[in-house]
Image: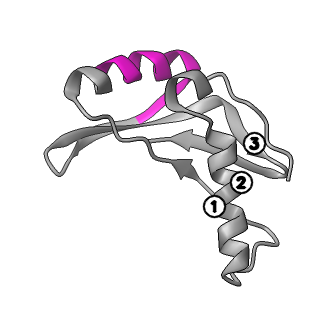
Amino acid sequence: MVTMSHPLDSTLGPMAPFVSQLLTELAALGVDMTAPHIDHLCYRAATLPEYQSLCEVLAGAGELLVEGMIGGRPIATYRLHQPVRVGDVEVPCIE
């Protein structure tokens, strides 16, 4: 499976290899992977300042879809201008 680098890899870590490994592990478990659909990836910030900094970065890389408080901490979801791509699989959002 061909993985592509992403502009956010330097900030969030290499996302496509993560998706590729996930797809490989699911296939090994017998999950039907003929047309996988992954709607988003999650990244958990350790602190509020890190979250705020990441939101600034993500605002330049995508469109804010929703932001709210879940479990007492802020969560935001962005639709990326450039989806994460692994082969034919595209992951359009990050939370």
Question: What residue would you read off at disc 1?
Answer: 22
Position of 15 compared to 53: left or right?
right
Residue sitting at x 58%, y 22%: 10
Inspect the image, locate mark 3, and give the three-letter code of the amino acid beneath it. Answer: Arg
Q: Which residues are magenta?
A: 52-65
Q: Which residue is mark 2?
A: 20
Which of the two discs, 1 and 3, labels the residue nearer the N terminus? Answer: 1
Residue identifier under label 3: 85
Q: Nearer the viewer, residue 65 or 85?
A: 85
Q: Residue at x 55, y 33 (%)?
A: 13
Give the prevailing secondary structure in the magenta stretch.
helix
The location of residue 45, given as percent across then percent down, is 32, 34
Is 33 on the left-hand or right-hand side of 75?
right
Residue 37 in view of the camera: no
In the depicted structure, whether residue 95 falls above or below residue 24: above
At horizontal 74% and vertical 79% (from top left) the residue drawn is 32
Taking the magenta stretch, the answer to whether it contains residue 58 is yes
- In the picture, which quadrant includes the C terminus? top left
The Cα–Cα distance between marks 2 and 3, rounded to whole angstroms, is 9 Å
Q: Residue 6 appears at what percent x and percent y? A: 69, 28
On screen, residue 65 above or below 49: below
* Percent x, y of residue 23: 70, 63
Question: Which residue is pictured at 47% across the width and 17% down the height?
Answer: 57
